[in-house]
Amino acid sequence: MADKAEKTDKSDDVVAVDPQTGIFPKFRQLWNGGEHRNAVDFAKAENVSEAEWTALLAEFPGIVDVINQ
């Protein structure tokens, strides 16, 4: 039973992502320049973490539309 509690605790951990570092400046430059597909392809190529995708989706909700095209 302790293992189950440990797994729950780990899934509740919050991972901090700094939107001023990593792929964010380049992604933002592409996206704001109208290159939405290139921005999404760039993020995919960089193998961003789930936390980074979450931060990107929060800042750029239109990503979903580009991915679904």
Image: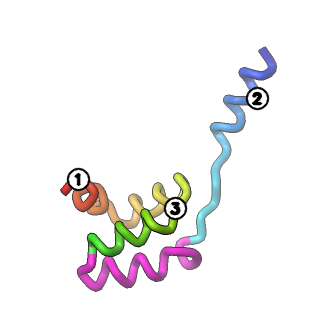
Q: Point out the stretch of residues depicted in magenta.
A: 19-35
**Quarter residue 13 falls in:** top right
Residue ID for mark 2: 6
Label 3 residue SS: loop
Check if residue 24 falls in the magenta segment.
Answer: yes
Label 2 residue SS: helix
Left or right side of 5 for 24 = left
**Pointer 3: residues within 10 angstroms few (<14), some, or many (20+)?**
few
**Quarter residue 8 falls in:** top right
Q: Nearer the viewer, mark 3 or mark 2?
A: 3
**Pointer 2: residues within 10 angstroms few (<14), some, or many (20+)?**
few
Distance in Å between CA atoms under marks 1 and 2: 36 Å
Left or right side of 67 for 9 = right
Residue at image coords 52%, 52%: 50
Q: Is residue 16 above or below residue 12?
A: below
Q: Position of residue 28 (x, y in %)?
A: 40, 78
Residue ID for mark 3: 47
User: Which mark is on residue 5?
Assistant: none
Q: Position of residue 51 (x, y in %)?
A: 55, 55
